[in-house]
Image: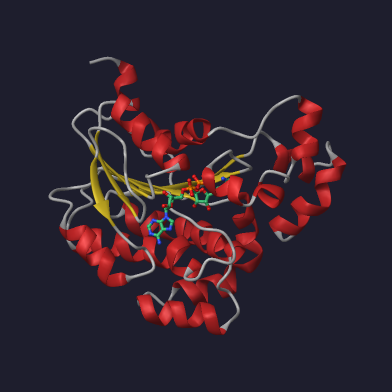
Amino acid sequence: MTLFDAFRFDGKRVLVVGGATGMGAAAAELAQAAGAEVIVADYAEVTLPGAKAIHVNLADAASIDTAVEQLGGPVHALLSAAGVADGTPGIERINFIGHRYLIDRLLAGGLLPRGSAIGFISSAAGLGWEANLPLLKEYLAITDFDAATKWAVEHGKADYMWSKQAVCAYVATQAMPLLKQGIRINAICPGPTDTPLAQTNKETWLGFGADYRAELGIEAATPLEQAYPLLFLVSDAASAINGITIVTDSGYFSAGLTEVFPTATPIVRFLSGR
Ligand SMILES: NC(=O)c1ccc[n+]([C@@H]2O[C@H](COP(=O)([O-])OP(=O)(O)OC[C@H]3O[C@@H](n4cnc5c(N)ncnc54)[C@H](O)[C@@H]3O)[C@@H](O)[C@H]2O)c1
């Protein structure tokens, strides 16, 4: 035993939802390297050697029920990584409602023991959640899968930005009630990261902040660079961190907010609802 063991996952089971590709896949591999037994639940084929693979469609509650039945034991760290871009049918379920439903099923089944932790991947697109908190709380109060889906569609909120704001608000509002059960919840809010999803939407996703990165001489983040803080958040080393959405964007948001990089200021003000 060393002091540094709090960063490791020996003897722990880590479930990565959306771990077939991109940041989730990087986090799954990293968790294995940190000693974890890794289970990957995804819609796509899982290729990570040594990981248990479970098929799940987050847009479908019955599919999530079936996936949870296949877990075969407790989950000490849940990484809620799956997400899709605007234009994907069911985005409100895949990016938020399905993840929350899965967490509720794990809680109901006693599968998230005391000491476990949840790490979401939200997005810089979700950072305006505080300005929208009253409406987000109205939405979050609808915990039924179909009723929440209906609300999002009927209110014109079945979109990427709202789904990520919902994740941030969910993380913040659940910090206290979950910790009563010994469970922590946090999120990362990545800036542009070079993943299959970003490549499919290259102009908007990887074009975002390109001027900032050019001035600094840096590239968009790699999936592994996002996996490091995500896995840290669900490690015992982060036991004092709860209810927080960490911006992992190489400083773009801060530079825009403070007008240190004025070109970013209007978009950052828009995204943060200020
Ligand atoms: N790449 C970026 O620039 C960026 C920036 C901010 C936030 N994000 C977020 O990061 C997360 C990871 O995305 P990524 O960029 O690694 O992309 P990705 O496409 O590589 O990973 C997303 C994963 O989600 C899975 N998935 C999609 N639909 C699903 C469904 N219906 N049921 C179950 N799984 C499903 C995919 O199969 C894939 O494995 C997403 O939540 C995304 O919104 C990405």
Picture coordinates of residue 227, whole percent (x, y): 46, 35
> Can you say whether 141 is above or below 271 in the image?
below
Residue 30's image quarter?
top left
Tell me, yes or no, if residue 100 can be seen here: yes
Picture coordinates of residue 200, whole percent (x, y): 59, 50
Picture coordinates of residue 241, whole percent (x, y): 44, 40
Residue 110's image quarter?
bottom left
Query: In front here: 90 or 105?
Result: 90
Residue at horizontal 52 percent and vertical 56 percent from the top? 168
Query: In front here: 140 or 25?
Result: 25
Residue at horizontal 72 percent and vertical 39 percent from the top? 252
Query: In front here: 84 or 251?
Result: 84
> Can you say whether 269 is above or below 148 in the image?
above
Residue at horizontal 80 percent and vertical 37 percent from the top? 211
Tell me, yes or no, if residue 239 can be seen here: no
Q: In the visual, does 200 lie left or right of 47?
A: right
Query: In front here: 239 or 253?
Result: 253
Quarter holding the N terminus? top left
Quarter holding the C terminus? bottom right
Q: Residue furthest left?
A: 72
Counting the numbered discs, the total is: 0
Q: Residue furthest top?
A: 2
> Can you say whether 234 is above or below 153 in the image?
above
Q: In the visual, does 30 lie left or right of 171?
A: left
What's the image's color scheme?
secondary structure
Q: In the visual, does 122 lie left or right of 269?
A: left
Residue at horizontal 70 percent and vertical 56 percent from the top? 272
Picture coordinates of residue 90, whole percent (x, y): 47, 70
